[in-house]
Amino acid sequence: MKLSAIAKIVNADFNEKDKEITGINTLKDASNNELSFISNSKYVKDIASSQAGAILVDKKNKEHVPLGCVALVVKNPYWAMATLSKYFSPQIESLDASDAEIGEGSLISQKAEIAKGAKIGKNCTILAHVYVGSNSIIGDNTVIYPNTTIYRDCIIGRDCIIHSNTAIGSDGFGFATNKLGEHKKIYQNGNVRIEDDVEIGSNVSVDRAVFGSTVLRKGVRIDNLVQIGHNCDIGEYCVFVAQSGSAGSSKFGRNVVMGGQSAVAGHLEIAAFSTFAARSGITNNIKESGKTFGGFPLLEQRTWLKLQVKIARLLK
Amino acid sequence: MKLSAIAKIVNADFNEKDKEITGINTLKDASNNELSFISNSKYVKDIASSQAGAILVDKKNKEHVPLGCVALVVKNPYWAMATLSKYFSPQIESLDASDAEIGEGSLISQKAEIAKGAKIGKNCTILAHVYVGSNSIIGDNTVIYPNTTIYRDCIIGRDCIIHSNTAIGSDGFGFATNKLGEHKKIYQNGNVRIEDDVEIGSNVSVDRAVFGSTVLRKGVRIDNLVQIGHNCDIGEYCVFVAQSGSAGSSKFGRNVVMGGQSAVAGHLEIAAFSTFAARSGITNNIKESGKTFGGFPLLEQRTWLKLQVKIARLLK
Amino acid sequence: MKLSAIAKIVNADFNEKDKEITGINTLKDASNNELSFISNSKYVKDIASSQAGAILVDKKNKEHVPLGCVALVVKNPYWAMATLSKYFSPQIESLDASDAEIGEGSLISQKAEIAKGAKIGKNCTILAHVYVGSNSIIGDNTVIYPNTTIYRDCIIGRDCIIHSNTAIGSDGFGFATNKLGEHKKIYQNGNVRIEDDVEIGSNVSVDRAVFGSTVLRKGVRIDNLVQIGHNCDIGEYCVFVAQSGSAGSSKFGRNVVMGGQSAVAGHLEIAAFSTFAARSGITNNIKESGKTFGGFPLLEQRTWLKLQVKIARLLK
C-alpha cells in the first residue's frame, strides 16, 4: 500500500516521496518498508533507533522522528494504527492459494477442513471437525484431536499433540479506544509458532500475535482451559496447569511452572525454573531463577505461608 | 398448553375457567397468557402488579394472588416451574421450518451447518464446523470462525466477529433441587441477543436466558475463556478480559472493564465506566460510576493497594 | 506385550520366566497380568499387598517387592512407566472395529462423526460436528450439542445433556520430568464414565483417567468452563459452578457445591454436602459433611467473613 494512500486514510499531511508500505510493526522491529507508531511516551526512546519507513506520531513527538523516516502526524496515533491494521489484514481464507499438501502416511478425516495453502507433514493424524487455516504448517507425527481450530499462517512443530476444542491463532485482544469510549479493532496480523514436542490440552486459547509471533517453545505442556495472550514467548518445557493464563507479550524462561488458576500480567519477564503455586498472581518481573512463589500480591511461597499464619492470628 | 393440563402435571387443584398458556415468565414480565411462579418470599411484593395469567404458589402465598389471576397451589413452586419448563421448550432443531436464508455475498463453508429457519445476512463469512441453530439470525458482515456454535433463536448483530470454539446460547445453569438433593432442569427457553460491532474471543460461553434475553450491547469486547451467565445485560463497549465472568442476571452499564479472572456475582447492577482490576470479586451493586476497584472482598483499588501494604507489615 | 520386551525397553535386567503383560496400573489396582511402578516412597506400603505381575522399582525399593512378583529395577521408575505407557495406548481410532450402532429413534446429524465401534442408545440427539470416539457408549435419550468431542472408550449414561464445545475424555495432564527438565508423556489409557441424568455445560474439559476411570455420578451438574482432572470421582448431584475445577484424583461425596472459580487440589477427599463459596481454594481433605467454606487458604465461610472484617481494620 502506498504511503500516500495511508496518509489519506488517517488524515495526515503528506508531501514526501511516496513509497510502498508492506505492513505495520513495532518501532523496534519495523523495517524500512513498514509503518510504525508511537502511542505511549514511554517508547519515545525507541524512535531514534527505529528502522521504520514511516511513523504515526502526534504533534508533540514529531521532533523525535529521525531523518529519512517519514512522520505522519495524527491526533491519536494508536487509533490511526488500529484503523490501518485492517488494510494489512490478509483474507480470512486464501481462496486462490494452491491446494493443501498432505504428507505421506497422514490420516486426515474426511470431516476435517484443511484450507488452501496449508501443509500437513508426514504421519500426522487430523481428526474430524479440525480446521487448519490457509498457509498453516503442521509438522510430522503431530496429532490434532476433534473440533480444534488452527487459524491461518500458524506453524506447529513435529510430534505435537493438540487436544479437542482448542483454538490456536485466534485474534489477540487488541483495540484502540477513543474519548467517546468506542473501540476500534487492531487486526492481529502476526501468527502462532509452536515448536516440537509440545502438548496442549482441551479448550485452550493461544492468541496470534499482533505483529510477529506468539511462541511456544520445545517441550511445553499446556493443560486445559489455559489462556496464552498475544505475543507471549513461552520457554522450553514450561508447564501451565489448568485454568492458568498469561496476558500479552510476557516472556517466560525455560521450565517455568504455572499452577492452576495462576496468572501473569502483560509485558513481564519470568526467569527460568520459576514455580508459581496455584492461583498466584504475577504482576512484576521475576529476575532470579529457580524460586517458588505464591499469592496475590505475589510473595515467595514460604513467606506467603508465613503471612497466612499471621493473618489467621487476627481472629484471636 | 391448557391451564387445566398444567395443573394436572403439577398436581394442583383447578376449578377455574380454562385458558391457553403460551409460556413461563417472571412475575414482572409475564403476560396474561403466561404462567409465573413465586419461589422466594422476597418477590411477594411483585405478585400484586403481575399481569400473569396464572401463578404457581405455595399455600402461604396464595392470598397474595390478585383477582383475575389463577393461583395454582403446589408444595414447591420452583420445582413445579422446573417440571413445566420442559413442556414449553422448543424442539432442539425445527425440522419443519423453512430452509435457511443466506444473504448476498456471504461465504458459507460447505462444512458449516446452518439449521432450518436460520437467516444469515449479507457479506458474512461462516467458516467450517460452525453451527447456526434454527431461527437464529446473523447480521450483515459478521464473521464466525470455525467450530463455534450459535444455538437456536439467537440474534447476532452486524459487523460482529466471533472467534473459534465459542458457544453462544448454551443453556443457563438452572435447576431446582428437592429435599433429597436431586436436581430438576429448568429449561432455558430464552435466547441471546448480541448487538452490532461486538467481538467475542475463543472458548467463550454466553448462556441463553431462562426467560427473555441475555444481551450484549453495541461495541462489547469479550476476550477468551469468558463466562457470561444467563440473563446478563452487558452494556455498550464493556470489556471482559480473559477468564473473567459474570454470574446470571447482572446488569452492566456502558464501558465497564472486567480485568482478567475477575468475576461478578449474580443479580447485581454495575455502574457505567467502572473498572475492575484482575481477579476482582464483585458481590455488591456498584452505584457510583467511573471508579476503579480491586480485590476480593472488593475495595477501591487504591484502598486495596494500601491494605496490601498493611497486611505485609504483619510479617515484621 | 511380553515382560521380557518391556524389560528391554526400559533397560532392566530380566532373568525370570516370561509372561504376557496387558497393561499398566497402580499398585493397588494392578492385576497379575499388569505392570505397576513405585515412584514415590510414600507408596512403599502398598507394594506388599499389590497383585501386580511386575513392578518397576529403583534399586533401594527392590527389597519390598513380594515373592511371585517380578521386580524390574530401573533408575527412574516414573520415567520408565511414562516410556512404557505409549506401548499400551490404543490406536486413536479403531479403524478395524465394527460400524457404529445407532439406537432406534436417535437423530444423528450427517455432519457428526460417530467413530467405528461406538454405540449410541435410543432416542438420542447428536448434533452437527459432534465427535464420538471408538467404542464409546452413549445412553438412551442423551443430547449432545454441536462441536462437542467424546474421546474413545468413554461411557455416557441415559438422559444426559452435554453442551457445545465440551471435551469429554481428553488426556489427563500427566508426564514424567527428568533431571534435564525434559518431559515425557504418560499416555492416559483410562476413560471417563458419566452416569445417568448428568448435565454438562459448554467449554468444559473432563479428562480421561490415566488408569481406570474419571467418574461423574448420577445427577451431577457442571456449568461452563469447568475443569475436571483425571481420575476424579464426582459424587451424585454435585454442582460445579462456572470456571471452577478439580485437579486430578480427588473424590467428592454427594451434593458438594463448588462455587464459581473455586478449585480443589489433587488427591483429596471432600465430604458430602460440603459447600464452597466462589473462589474457594481447597487444599486439604474435608472430613465433616454439611459445612460451608470460603477463602484461600480455606476457612469455614463465617470465619472467613469475620477474618475479612479484622483485615479491613488494618486500614485504620
Image (cartoon, coloured by chain):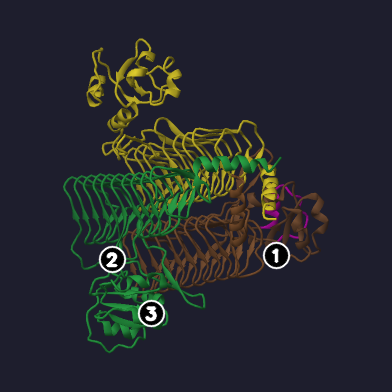
Chain colours: A brown, B yellow, C green
**Which range is magenta?**
A2-19
Vertical placement of B110 versus A69: above or below? above
Q: CA distance from mark 2 to mark 3?
A: 38 Å
Q: Residue furthest top?
A: B67
On-image quarter of the N terminus of chain A: bottom right
Residue B114 location (% of width, % of height): 35, 45
Neighbor class of circle 1 (other Cα within 10 Å; few <14, some 14-19, many 20+) is some
Neighbor class of circle 3 (other Cα within 10 Å; few <14, some 14-19, many 20+) is some
Is residue C184 visible to us here?
A: yes
The answer to which of B46 and B164 lies nearer the viewer is B46
SS at circle 2: loop
Q: On what subunit does the disc labeled 3 rest? A: C
Answer yes or no: are tags 1 and 2 on the same subunit.
no
Answer yes or no: are tags 2 and 3 on the same subunit.
yes
Residue type at mark 2: give it: Glu
Q: On what subunit does the disc labeled 1 rest? A: A
Q: Give the residue drawn at x 20%, y 50%.
A: C121
Q: Quadrant of residue B116?
A: top left
Tell me if B151 is positioned left or right of A70 in this view: left
Neighbor class of circle 2 (other Cα within 10 Å; few <14, some 14-19, many 20+) is some
Q: Give the residue drawn at x 27%, y 70%.
A: C30
Tell me if A1 is positioned left or right of A227 in this view: right
Q: Which residue is mark 2?
A: C93
Vertical placement of B27 versus A77: above or below? above
Tell me if C14 is positioned left or right of A233 in this view: left
SS at circle 1: loop
| Residue A28: mark | 1
Residue type at mark 1: give it: Lys
